[in-house]
């Protein structure tokens, strides 16, 4: 009976460990997606900064 309890506890711990591993994998995938989104946003921000500089230059020339 004691052995059955130990086996049951081992099975419970193994399941908990597997659940945590699965959760970690999902979080890693989510982090990867967020990092890709961040890279895209940074690229877009750089492009907008460049466009802004160009527009400011044009407006500056028009107001002279």
Image (tube, grey):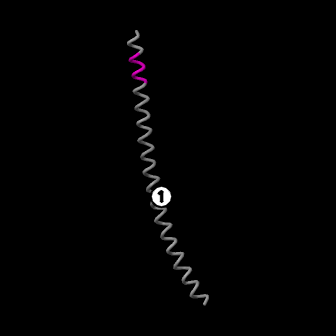
> Predominant secondary structure in magenta?
helix
Q: Is residue 24 left or right of residue 57?
A: left
Q: Residue at the top extreme? A: 1
Residue beneath the point at 38% across and 17% down: 7
- Where is residue 6 shown, x and y percent of the image? 40, 16
Total number of numbered discs in the rendering: 1
- Where is residue 39 shown, x and y percent of the image? 45, 60
Q: Is residue 14 above or below residue 42?
A: above
Q: Is residue 7 magenta?
A: yes
Name the quarter where the C terminus is drawn: bottom right
Q: Secondary structure at mark 1?
A: helix
User: Magenta segment, which residues?
Assistant: 6-12
Mark 1 burial class by Cα count in 10 Å: few <14, some 14-19, many 20+: few
Residue beneath the point at 41% across and 28% down: 15
Q: Is residue 40 above or below residue 62?
A: above
Residue beneath the point at 44% across and 38% down: 23
Residue beneath the point at 50% across and 66% down: 45
Q: Residue at the bottom extreme? A: 64
Using the rendered view, name the quadrant where residue 4 is placed. Answer: top left
- Where is residue 14 shown, x and y percent of the image? 39, 27
Name the quarter where the N terminus is drawn: top left
Using the rendered view, name the quadrant where residue 3 is placed. Answer: top left
Q: Is residue 11 magenta?
A: yes
- Give the residue number, with chain letter if any, for mark 1: 38
Q: Is residue 9 above or below residue 61?
A: above
- Where is residue 28 shown, x and y percent of the image? 42, 45
Q: Is residue 15 above or below residue 54?
A: above
């Amino acid at each position: 009976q004691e052995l059955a309890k130990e086996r049951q506890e081992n099975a419970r711990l193994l399941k908990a460990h597997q659940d945590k591993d699965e959760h970690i994998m999902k979080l890693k995938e989510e982090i990867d997606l967020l990092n890709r989104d961040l890279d895209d946003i940074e690229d877009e921000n750089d492009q907008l900064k460049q466009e802004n500089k160009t527009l400011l230059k044009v407006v500056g020339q028009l107001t002279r």
